[in-house]
Amino acid sequence: MNEQAVYLSETIDAIVAGAGSLLPELLLAIFFLLLVTLDLFKSPTIKRLLPWLALSGLFASLLLQILGGYTSGDEPFLNLLLSDGLARYAGILFSTAGIFTILLSLQNRPLERLQQGKGEYYALILMLVLGLNLMGKSVNLLMVFLAIETVSIASYILTLTLKHEKRAVEAGLKYILYGALSAGVMLYGMSFFYGLTGTLNYSSEVFRIGLLQANTLLVTVAAVLVFAGFFFKISAAPFHFWVSDVYQGAPLPVVALFSTGPKMAGIIVILRFVKPFENQLAYADVQLFLGIAAIATLVIGNFTALWQNTPRRLLAYSSVSHAGFLLTGLLAFNTDYTVSVLFYLTVLLFMNFGIFLFLQLSENTFKVQKLEDFAGLGRAYPFIGVMALLYLLSLTGLPPLAGFMGKLLIFSNVWEAYTLGGNTLLLTLLIIGVLLTGVALFYYIKIPYYLFFKGNFREENLVTSLSDKLLLALFALPLLVLFFKPDLLLNWMKQLLAQTL
Amino acid sequence: MEGVPLEHILILSALLFSLGVLAVITKRHAVVVLMGIELIFNAANLNLVAFSRFDPLLLQGQLFSLFVMVVAAAEAAVALAIVLRVYQLFKTANLNQVNHLSK
């Protein structure tokens, strides 16, 4: 009994000492509670303030993470959460994604018309970002599970924001069934990791040694089960079926958040989780599984996108193919792939929000539902057309845009890892990745083709708001800057990861 | 420590897991699919509690299973609310008939 009393007092001391490292999360939690409470008031003035309150909460957490000074370095909080440079950079990305989502929501027509549940909508976005932050920090199986479920449950409810629409409800049902199934499968795998190693902290030495002593087949099976849950979050094959439905049913700001936030967080979780599996000799099977999953995701994402005739479904499969590229980047072990993957994630954030803002503008103002509806829009409204072209070229990965830089960094890392280790899996991945970038051009180029070369647009005098145009330009600017000066971000990122900032 | 051997518990949990997956794959009623998912969660819980006996000081497995129950309850609440909404709009909870998006 005495043993446990000592343990208890040590734990309380650790909580008091480490609570400071959770400052951004605490801040978001406080703003979440504030929003939920204020939503109870009937006054329209308070209701109108809610989005701005959510925005200020996200800004505060963004500033805190940029300035730093609260991190605990290499010591995880209660063996659960590690506030290192990687988590800080991830947190900056998540807060930015949250801010962009709210900015898009303020311009969204269907949301504007919504009578009920606006306050909850903004509160849930804060909750989702909080969950993403926890995903970025967790080094413990229990914490990963809780963080992923926080994000998932917030996502399910956000999908149903427009709950009077059949498509939203159907998408929500499919989302939660796939989500709960993959969470259960992941949990079953986690229980085996706990049994094999006796610890839940997967960044610890005990975990690494426990795995080396365990039966390789069991480790592989458990890893495959756990990756099921992670793949669901980043929408990688074979857990991508929800993507096209959810992208059709949810409001576009939420779709933009889903295509970036959980994907970034899932990649960071995988980034931390694969560290014990870097040894190519001991874990050839696990790496083979990841490689096959990456190839399958790339092939399915790119080829299915070719047959789509609505922009929402096209972008859904484009988001699957980006998950494939990110997984490819994660397999370049023994190189500094962390920086490249983070760079790709940053670029993905800007181009996805850009293209979804363009889509929201097209749906709200120009009543676009299918790809054919884009016909002539680019010639009638040149500014919007050119911006769309920029985002689509960046998504394809063509110069002079940052999407090209992101793919180049990832492919050069894979090449470096291949020349170091001679693993043919990496060479296959590299070749397939480059070839599929060519395929990607065919479906992305469909939209500009309609925009500029086909037909005439029905109405010439529709008004687009200035704030929409400003936002379009704002999201495009980093894409150009990061192509010409990628070192600016790369150097800052390296300093942040080395915790010298 | 006396008690049921570990192998027996693992076999039982594997059976539960397989039954859960089977229910998810074969059944077409949304609520029954959710019950299958619940079986999968319970299989994992059983494993966690069983492995926890080798971790007598921290009991991390037992603690984990408590969290799992809470999360599963929260998820089931949201899921059933969604199923209710589906039933109101589509007049059915059969998954094969709730399929308009992919057409």
Image: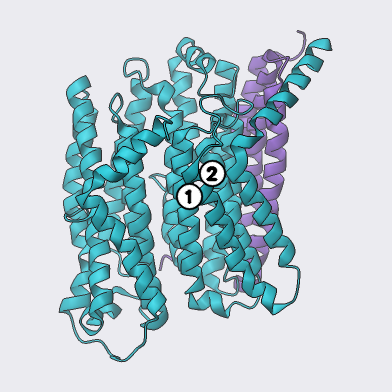
Chain colours: A cyan, B purple
Foreground of the two, A91 or A147: A91
| A354 with respect to B88 (left or right) | left
* Amino acid identity at mark 1: Phe
The reply to whether label 2 and label 1 mark residues of one chain is yes
- Eyeballing the image, is A107 above or below A64? below
Foreground of the two, A381 or A470: A470
Question: What's the residue at 35%, 64% (across, down)?
Answer: A474
Q: Chain of mark 1?
A: A
Q: Quadrant of residue B103?
A: bottom left
| A150 with respect to A243 (left or right) | right
What numbered label is drawn on residue A133?
Answer: 2
What numbered label is drawn on residue A319?
Answer: none
Q: Chain of mark 2?
A: A
Image location (x, y in percent) of residue A373: 30, 80
Return the residue at label 1. A94
Q: Residues within 10 Å of mark 2 (few under 14, many from 20)?
A: many
Q: Quadrant of residue B64?
A: top right
Question: What's the residue at 23%, 36% (across, down)?
Answer: A429
* Residues at circles 2 and 1 in contact by the CB criterion of under 8 Å: yes
State the quadrant of the C terminus of chain A: top left
Question: What's the residue at 50%, 52% (across, down)?
Answer: A95
Q: Residues within 10 Å of mark 1 (few under 14, many from 20)?
A: many
Q: Quadrant of residue A181?
A: top right
Q: CA distance from mark 2 to mark 1?
A: 7 Å
State the quadrant of the N terminus of chain A: top right
Image location (x, y in percent) of residue B33: 61, 50
